[in-house]
Image (cartoon, rainbow, N blue to C red):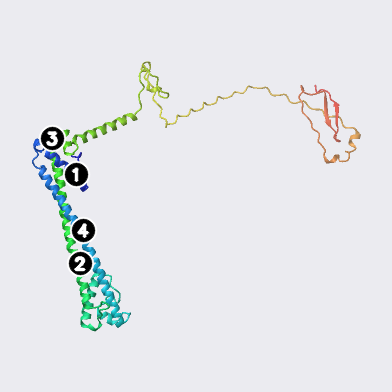
Amino acid sequence: MAANVTPIQDSKLLSAIALLVKGCQKLESELGIRQNTSAVLQQALDEVQETQKSLNQQKKALSAVRQNFQVSDRLAKKTISNCRLRLAMLYGQEFNADWEKVGFPDHSTAVPESLEKRQALLLSLEKHFQYTPLQESKDMEATAEACRSAWSEVNESRIVIEKETKLRTKAVRARNKARLMLKKRYRSLIVELGVLISPDDPKWREFGLNPPARKRRTKLEMETAAEASIEDDRPLEAAEGEPPPPGDEEAVEDPEMDAVPAEPAKEQDEPEPMATPPEPEPVIEPETEPAAPPAPVEEPESTPPASRAGPAKGANKRRPTAQLELLLPSDLPSETKELSETGEVESAETDAPF
């Protein structure tokens, strides 16, 4: 019955069992409950409560014994320290063979840190003062009797602690056993109710339980909600008589376009093939008649003697050359210009070449 999970915490488990007991007292005769009756459940509940109470008492007792042990242990440390001060007056502060004969461990005159070593040292000091009573000091409380008393108190406290620890462990095991039996009764009653009443019967509420059918209905509702969310993610179809939204013209069906086969859609990722350019047509040049050779140009008349005499001062720096222009008969002017050696422009009449 996944709808009713067994409580883990003790307080919730005890509360759930109390509700089961009330439900059994009210409906066990009507439903015919035979195995997990109210008396059986109440007995299991009482056993858990009693074992828990016993465990709490054992915890308190163990705590008190530990406090007594700490007091006796402090007394034992003080007794060893008093004996050490008394022997230091006789053997000195430094560790030597006399300290070793007394029984101080680890080549040191300090109080041992281990409990076992402190108890062993108390017995050694008791024997030492018994063999050498002159070294005892009642004023300093360094006597064989004081060492024996301190050892006895520590030893008794230690024994009591071990005893109480065992009792506490036994109480924990008894409590765990009773709690496990209570959980089994809880599950057993749920199974028995599942046989006696239907999963959707409201009588489950009388026992403080959830109807098992509620879990199944909730799961079905969750599956339905998941399917509805998936359908909501799909694009909505355009309603009849309403214009399609922009960009969704293809979603509207047109009866006239049914007869026309639709062109297959082109894939966006595949690029369109590039059109090859047409080959250029050969250009036929028209035949032309050869041009007539240019007419000979007559040389200009010789310059006068005055111009041959020589250029003026500074004229030798830049002496432009004479340029002859070839003119066609149609463009030949009546007068031509020429440059003299002196750089002056003179106009001369020329006759037409024709």
The answer to whether the residues at label 1 and label 4 have Cβ atoms under 8 Å apart is: no
The answer to whether the residues at label 1 and label 2 have Cβ atoms under 8 Å apart is: no
Q: Which comes before the other along the chain, label 1 or label 4?
A: 1
Quarter placement of the C terminus: top right
Q: Mark 1 points at which residue?
A: 15
Question: Disc 4 marks which amino acid?
Answer: Lys
Question: Disc 3 marks which amino acid?
Answer: Ile
Identify which residue is drawn at 21% across, 47% down. 11
Inter-mark Cα distance, 1 to 3 = 23 Å
Q: Mark 4 points at which residue?
A: 60
Element under label 4? helix
Identify which residue is drawn at 18% across, 64% down. 162
Q: Which mark is residue 228?
A: none
Q: Which of marks 4 and 3 is in front?
A: 4
Q: Which mark is residue 157?
A: 2
Q: Nearer the viewer, mark 1 or mark 3?
A: 1
Element under label 1? helix
Inter-mark Cα distance, 4 to 2 = 15 Å
Inter-mark Cα distance, 2 to 3 = 59 Å
Q: In this view, does 251 lie above or below 39?
A: above
